[in-house]
Image (tube, grey):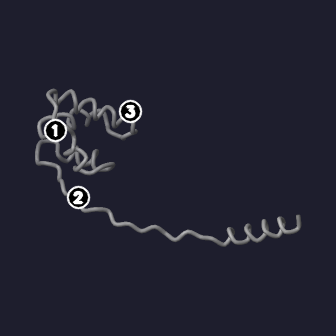
Amino acid sequence: MQRTVLLAIALAAGFGSVTAAPVNYQLPNEVAAFKPGPNLEVVQGNCSACHSADYIKTQPPMKDKKGFWQAEVTKMIKVYGAPIDDADVGKIVDYLAATY
């Protein structure tokens, strides 16, 4: 019994002094940029706050571009909480449908 208590105290003392080293990492360079077009500033101001242009560029080809991008912008607002003004939604959708 005495051994068990001493072992527990030793383990507790040992674990109490363990500290984790800080983690450092380097983000990769962005390889994509938003394409020029009408409402580019609105898209950069809203979309790049959460993700890079790489994310938009990797979306699959689609037939109904406007419908796809409308659904994506709506998802960003309702699911991920993107603080996009109602006045900007149409501008973003139009830019993405015309550009990607």
Q: Is residue 36 left or right of residue 80?
A: left
- What residue do we see at 28% from left, 62% from top? 28
Identify the residue under disc 1. 95
Q: Nearer the viewer, residue 89 or 27?
A: 27
Identify the residue under disc 3. 78
Identify the residue under disc 2. 30
- What residue do we see at 32% from left, 50% from top? 49
Tell me where residue 54 appears, x and y as whole percent: 22, 50
Kindly identify the amino acid type of the residue bearing the numbered disc 2.
Glu
Kindly identify the amino acid type of the residue bearing the numbered disc 1.
Tyr
Q: Is residue 13 left or right of residue 18?
A: right
Tell me where residue 36 appears, x and y as whole percent: 11, 48
Kindly identify the amino acid type of the residue bearing the numbered disc 3.
Lys
Distance in Å between CA atoms under marks 2 and 1: 21 Å
Mark nearer the viewer, 2 or 1: 2
Q: Element at badge 3? A: helix
Picture layout, residue 51 above or below residue 75: below
